[in-house]
Image (cartoon, grey):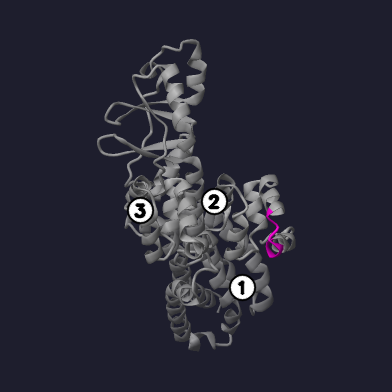
Amino acid sequence: MVNTLLLPELREMLAEGNAQELAEFFSAVNASRAAEFMEGLTAEETWAALQHAPLADRLQVFFFLDHDKQVEIVETADRDQIVELIEELAADDRVDILQGVNDEIEQDILKRMSADERRETIKLSAYPEGTAGAVMTTEVAMLDEKFTVIEALAELARQSEDLETIYYLFVVDERNVLQGLVSTRQLVTALSKPNTRLRELMETELVTALPSDDQEEVAEKVARYDLLAIPVVDEQRRLLGIVTHDDVIDVLREEALEDAQRLGGLEPLEHGYLSTSVLSLSWKRGIWLTVLFCASITTAFILGSYEDTLKREELVWLSAFVPLIISTGGNSGAQSATLVVTAMAAGTVLPRHWKKVFLRELFSGLLLGTFLAAIGMIVGTFQAPSILAAVAVPISIVFIVVSATAIGGLLPLLFGKMGLEPAIMSNPFVAGIMDILGILIFVNVGIAVLSLTS
């Protein structure tokens, strides 16, 4: 939601060219709040306002801007000024922004950058999207294992201006092979013994990641071991960079958003909702809507095949319960699928746990089905020609809910075992299967009950 509190004042300052008040705005307001107040400005207005902030403040505010606005500014603003700003960004943030801009503009910006920054940007851009290499930063504190505490502090002071974080200090040998880790706190505490070598202080049992590792797996490692950053190393254990906790938060937020979209039965959006074209949005939604539509067609044909049966006077009352039966099966199955998919995402459920999942969902389905069946029995007595005939409703509900929970619990595990995406596959398939199965169970239970009561 756009914060319009200072929007009129900002526009007025820009219109009047009030450099003093704009400079005061950036010096007085926190960078994240400044970006929030500027959300209602166009990209051109935002960049014009940022010209009145010192480069360090301009960089901070730019970092907190919406990604789409960042890209628009990079594509439209003065190229030399943009290069100056882009070079000051952390390498991973720089790559994220440049990957969103027009290819021709990206190449032009890269040509204007210094050789070191260009080389680093191209190297990070080469890692596939969604891997540790693509989200890592190469600005990492590296200290020689031979350094004493005093020498390490002096070197840290020299490096600190260019580092994204100094919580963890990574100890390497002359070939940059990772040897261990020393925290800044350890280093300061060890000042009482200033000649102690880092190799005597460092922790050697480290959790690491390869640049090819999936970013979600890396995020899970950081969360599991409660790390502030995780080192990324190559096959020879040479230190390439680190994935910091703020990068992990971004990854988890991105993955959660994708999972939520998949659970809704659509392909994840590559960009924001408003930045995605209507055609692309319709395509991503249409894939699974088509699957569900085809399942509904099958349901219609099956229901049609029972048309003559349902027209019989003693069974016609069953028709009123068809929507209830179908929705109950779909809803209970979707609940089970969602629970299992989220548990799989958290790493607490694996495909090998299928027996435990099956039994749990079977008993859950039995409990839920029994409870819903009691309500169904009460409602059924008002529609059915007799109390005995109304028994068809609760019996059907129990069978349908038990089937739905079992299927909803097992399908994500099956898809995961097959290497398919459980979140996007489960709910549409559960809904389609239960539409068909629900009709078959309900009508056949109704016929069976009728034969026993007639």
Q: Residue sitting at 56 percent across and 60 percent down? A: 369
Q: Secondary structure at mark 1?
A: helix
Q: Secondary structure at mark 2?
A: helix
Q: Secondary structure at mark 3?
A: helix
Question: Quarter of the image holding residue 323?
Answer: bottom right
Locate the C terminus and report the quarter of the image it occupies. Answer: bottom right
Q: CA distance from mark 2 to mark 1?
A: 64 Å
Task: Point out residue 329 in the picture as x, y percentages from the top left corner.
Answer: 52, 67
Judged by depth in the image, the label closer to the viewer, 1 or 3, is: 3
Q: Earlier in the sequence, mark 2 or mark 1?
A: 2
Give the amino acid type for the residue marked by disc 3 in the picture: Ser
The segment highlighted magenta reads 14-19
Left or right: where 354 falls relative to 44? left
Question: Quarter of the image holding residue 437?
Answer: bottom left
Task: Point out residue 73 in the picture as x, y percentages from the top left corner.
Answer: 52, 62
Q: Residue sitting at 36 percent across and 19 percent down? A: 199
In the image, farthest residue toward the left? 236
Give the amino acid type for the residue marked by disc 2 in the picture: Phe
Magenta stretch contains residue 16:
yes
- Identify the mark at residue 125; answer none if there is no mark: 3
Q: In this view of the protein, can residue 160 be seen by the observer?
A: yes
